[in-house]
Amino acid sequence: MRRLLKPVTLLQVLLISLPFFLLSSLMFGVETMSITQLLSLLVQGPDSTGQEGLILFHIRLPRAVLGLLIGAIFGSAGAVLQGLFRNPLADPTLIGVAAGASAGASAMIVIGASWLSFHSVVGLPLVACGAFAGGLLAVIVVYRLANTPEGTSVSTMLLAGIAISALAGAINSLFSFFSDDHMLRRISIWQMGGLDQANWQQVGLIALIAALLAWRLPRESGALNAILLGESEARHLGIDVEWMKRRLVILTALGVGCSVAVTGWIAFVGLIVPHVVRLLIGPDHRYLVPASALLGAALMMVADTLARLVVAPAELPVGVVTALFGGPFFISLLMQSRRLS
Amino acid sequence: MLSAENISLDIGGVLILHGLNFRLQAGEITVIVGPNGAGKTSLLRVLTGDIQPTHGDVSFNHKPIHQWPMLERARHMAILPQSSNLNFPFLVEEVVMLGRTPHSSGLERDHEIVQQTLELVDASYLRGRAYTYLSGGEKQRVQLARVIAQIWDAESDTTQALILDEPTSSLDLEHQRMVLQAVRQLAARNILVIMVLHDLNLAANCADQIIMLRCGRVAASGSPLEVIEPDIIKQIFNVEVDIIPSRQTNLPVIIPR
């Protein structure tokens, strides 16, 4: 198998094309803006008056930036989890991390609303904490179950993911049962995965998490490469495997948990993106992780633009779009791996 | 120097290793042989610090093995496991490059080392191929190149160790001989080598010292000429053999009856 691209070339292409995806996501919608109109509004800054200015700075820009960051987080978290599990089928949504996070988040929404009656400003960090705790618990359980000295058992990993998703689903239903109509609608819309509620507060939280991941993950790439050989092999190469696993599990649960708290499930980005990148430039994590972040961001821009255009003036939750693409992709991966084994 | 003092290993009430004592010197090739389940791999895992013995001590260069900082140990001791499952399509040269993980010798030097170790195991022609598409024997040679790359450059004047668990199990006759040749070259550079082998003729051919394990105990140990004896082999492997000296090297050659 040949490498299709040099890693640096792919990173350059993605870095150059990302602003174009961002601009087109800002231009298209129910109200289409021309590129000149968009640029002049951006130059004027958030003080610009008029309907277009409002749409741009209060709706489209936070939404686009949020999508970009969430895509980057899911892409890189997927790459890291696949390395950690030594298995290209690990994905935050498939192995139950997102489900655990969503159960944690809905627990927080309902408990927070009924007992603490919090204001939305306090709400988001609390929901994010709930999602982080739920996601962390899920990834620890799946890892404990699926990891054996001979490697990760794919079937155990996926089955554990199903079990956790089912359990988390039951917990979700339980909370839905105890919530009022308004809460119910909020929980169910949020679970479909959408960016439509995006605001600058959410962008701030997610930007913080994305910055943390961008700072920490590149330091782990050498260790992630080594762990693909096996845990004891990585230990023989001088890597403190237990510590590294702990750090990475916490970082990915934090990334996925907070993303899920803000946007609900956005399925398959963490699966598709690292896969495509690996096909193009190979599995070296020094390039795989940043390239997956960039491609994830680009993919989210495209999916969100599509979600707004296909059924305009209404819009689809972006999670539905990614799942519609991701489902068939995952099935084709399964068929491929069956043919190989 | 690597020494084992009275080590015993008990896993879940089963005695895997029982009171083993030996002392291995730099530049020596020690081959561990024994029937299946004799405790060969467990012994390697104890010697490398992967598992703590229930009793006794292992020390490497006069320091207990578990007191070695992980990175320091990785710079001095490289281990080839019996089997590896790497499922990601790294290129062969990238796999070998992973052996340089504990070092910070610079990219240029690392590339030289990758080139040299691949040549040593006759795998240079594979360097641009994806590891996942190689045959079993090719994978084994590439993994061997990886662990050799890990200890290719001497670290100050401390002894380095190369520990190989059945390095020739998937290799053809030519490559078996070639690997033993490579191991001898490394031993000549004062590297301490420990190998588990199944083929007694290969063992007789390259070992300075052979340790024969049976049921977790050292049943015999010494130079090939001392331990390759029909009655010792009968006692350990339960096989009747004839032994004749090789016409060229005068080393013992074993022929099952």
Image (tube, grey):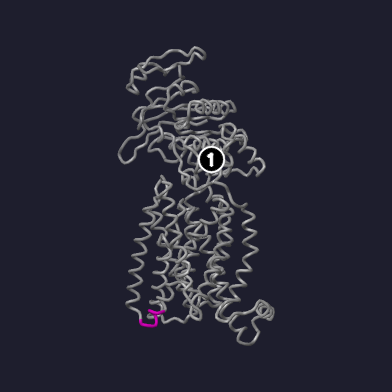
In percent of width and height, residue B40 lies at: 40, 32
Q: Is residue A283 magenta?
A: no
Callout 1, which amino acid?
A: Arg
Looking at the magenta stretch, what is its main secondary structure?
Answer: helix
A258 left or right, relative to A159: right
Pinpoint residue A85: horizontal percent, then vertical percent. Answer: 45, 53
Query: How many residues crowd around disc 1 within 10 Å: few (fewer than 14), some, or many (20 or more)?
Result: many
Closer-to-camera residue (B60/A174): A174
The magenta segment: A180-185
Residue A247 appears in the figure: no
Front residue of this view, candidates A90 and B163: A90
Q: Examine the rendered structure and indicate whether residue B8 appears above or below residue A140.
A: above
Disc 1: which residue: B73
Task: Say which residue appears at 52% left-offset and 35% top-offset.
Answer: B141
**What is the chain identity of the residue bearing mark 1?**
B
Image-quadrant location for residue B199: top left
Residue at image x 34%, y 70%?
Answer: A171
User: What x and y, as percent, mark residue B197?
Assistant: 44, 28
Above or below, comparing residue A14 to residue A55 in the picture: above
**Is residue A322 found left or right of B150 in the rendered image?**
left
Residue A276 position in % (x across, y down):
53, 56
Which element carries disc 1, helix, strand or loop? Answer: helix
